[in-house]
Image (cartoon, rainbow, N blue to C red):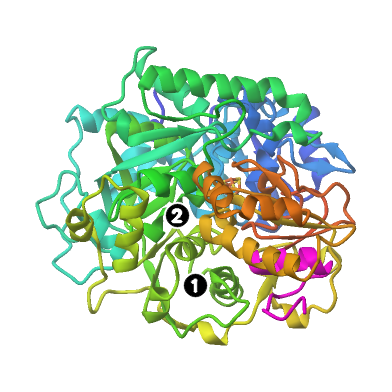
Amino acid sequence: MRENWPPAKIALNPEKRVLFLTKDLELIKQQLYDGLNLKMEDLTVDDLLDDINTDVMTPAWVCFDHDPAEIAKNAYAGLMHNGLRVFNENALKNGNFEVIVSGQRKGTGSSRETAPQCERWAGINIVIAASFAPIHAQNNINLGQIMGDHSMLERLQKGENIALEEFTSRYDKVTQIILEKGGLFAFAKLLKNGEIKLPPLDTPPRPMTMAEKIIARNLVGQVEGQCVKPNDPVIAQVQGGYSHEFTTAQVHTFLQNEYGEDYTLPNPSKFAVFEDHLLYAHHNPKFVPHMDKIQTLRDLQVEFQKHTSVRDYSAKDGVSPGICHQVAREEFIEVGDFIQATDSHTCMGGASNALTWGVGATEYANLISAGFTSIKVPESIRFELVGTLVPGCTAKDVILYILADHAREELTLNRSMEFGGEGLASLSIDERATLCNMATECSGRTGICEADDLLFEWMLKSQPHLDLETQKSRAVHSDEGAQYHGGVHTINMSEIQPMVAHPGNPDEGIPSDPTNGANITDIGDVSIDIAYGGSCTAGKADDVAYYAQVCQAAENAGLVVKEGVDFYIQYGSGLVKDLAVNEGWHDLFGRVGVKLIDPGCGACIGAGPGVSITPEQVTVSAINRNFQGRSGPGKLYLASPLTVAASAFMGIITSWHEELFN
Ligand code: SF4
């Protein structure tokens, strides 16, 4: 914790400096290395870098360090000029800066908390930008970073003292208190000790969405039956959560720093650790130099698990029990739960009619030690699914369609994406998980599906210890008249054709993005080098059944995987693999030339077999993100499990139909 931060009046420290992240990268270098000091009054907002993404601030390799002080040494390591780093090691820290200034939309991209950490632990206390990406702003708030705009900076540089309140007044009451107390940890401690009283909610009884209902019944410090509305700042209990080896070490370190080496957790059995993300990291030559740090992350996760006794999903003999989101829904997420975990695809749990979303390490460390979390009730958008899927289509095509047509700031941004309607009832629970999983690609806060008998049946089959009546009583349905700020959108599934999200065209400034939807019939003949079926989105039982359906048809037609194509299938969990073995699919895959990989994450984050090696290679993949470079340097098309498997045998991107191989 920083001593005496923040003060009641914010002023610039005369011994410290202000760093302007200018579009002219030479100017940044002069500030870093030649002592140049700039003033806001001499610049315009247009002179400053826009859309600084979190990957620029802390590229993936920087995140192999768990100690924020180490992360800060490589702050902005991803900002390159003529192939070289603009920020050399320790450049931000050694520059003696306390303010950092940029243009529009600071902190876009992934939700990684290491991005604001790299600034804070390099000495930055005040972050100035015209606007901030929502999750990045939340991470700043949790770390106690003060955010302001350019006119405030101009006043500060003229020697003015600005009341802290002026920086915090744009936020809700709870966020104001978090910032005034210096961040989430300090706030939570005071709340736990009864030194802070939360303002009572005055939201009157009202019809609520599914997300609102789950939050309302978990409210802390409010009267029984209190309703919530969007943007209400509340403290809510969580029923469980999990972290993985990329994030656990930080959680452990933060808890040790805040509560001492002998800290304890009140409810360890409700939380878990997973070893799933970096099991195959040694396959990526770029990660090989960092294997010692990766081993440290693994060791610290083991230490955390032993110290706290949370549920243990470590790899055994080098094999992971599975991807955290898949195993969590198979083994411990229950209907109606409120779950938070340190990964953006936590939203996949919404298929179980639970409210689930990803949080940063600070928020997670806080909530597992306190048992509650501070949130703002999200707005909602509803998708009313009607009709049934046409042959060759899966839920993946539905969400690619929604990504292409609805993933816009005014519709999905930061909202709970609610899926319901008679069309949903025709989708299996695994297919519903695909919809919820990719809510985060829509920039939604989460996805949540209506509960029905199919769900209860699936829950009891997956977790036989559960009681049917209890699960039914925990289910939430949205109320008649509930408010959807993103609107209610009817999606006729029978009108959706097999789709891809294409890799864009960098020459025309179109980035590779999951929102680049196109019907397969419109993309012409696209030859492929790699077909990849796996990940949390597409390594579930029903996905593997789709791969098996196509592979069986191929075998019946005397086909094997097309020469020159590598077709990988990676199971989402040990249970999914067991199913594949028992059904004979595992052997079938082997007979037709599929390369099989044990459960876990892998190529999806560029850390496992199935990544591209050259920029020319083309991949069709059932994963959820096609951001440039995430799964190797090649071009990556997102598609359904059926399309991936069909394409592997045809050698070009092809949608599946029963007669394809005849
Ligand atoms: S499979 Fe990919 S998207 Fe899913 S949790 Fe692992 S790395 Fe993340």
In this rendering, the answer to whether 658 lies above or below 344 is: below
* Label 2 Cα neighbours within 10 Å, binned few <14 / some 14-19 / many ≥20: many
Cβ of mark 1 under 8 A from ligand 1 = no
Q: Is residue 516 left or right of residue 650?
A: left
Quarter holding residue 505? bottom right
> What secondary structure is marked by label 1?
loop
Q: Find residue 370 and name its label.
A: none
Quarter holding residue 68? top right
Image location (x, y in percent) of residue 507: 86, 66
Q: Residue furthest top?
A: 261
Task: Depth check: give the residue in front, 471 or 515.
Answer: 471
Task: Depth check: give the residue in front, 368 or 610.
Answer: 610
Identify the residue at horizontal 68%, vertical 32% (top origin). 62
Question: What segment carries the magenta color?
Answer: 638-662
Q: Quadrant of the N terminus?
A: top left
Can the viewer see residue 410 in this picture? Answer: yes
As shown in the figure, which amino acid type bears the numbered disc 1? Glu
In this rendering, the answer to whether 431 lies above or below 464 is: below
Q: Quadrant of the C terminus?
A: bottom right
| Residue hosting label 2 | 347
| Residue hosting label 1 | 410
* Mark earlier in primary sequence (2, 1): 2
Image location (x, y in percent) of residue 227: 18, 61
Identify the residue at horizontal 43%, vertical 23% (top origin). 305
Image location (x, y in percent) of residue 429: 42, 63
Let me know if residue 109 is in the magenta part.
no
In this rendering, the answer to whether 97 lies above or below 640 is: above
Identify the residue at horizontal 66%, vertical 75% (top origin). 499
As shown in the figure, which amino acid type bears the numbered disc 2? Cys
Q: How far apart are the two marked residues, 2 and 1, measured between alpha carbons?
A: 20 Å
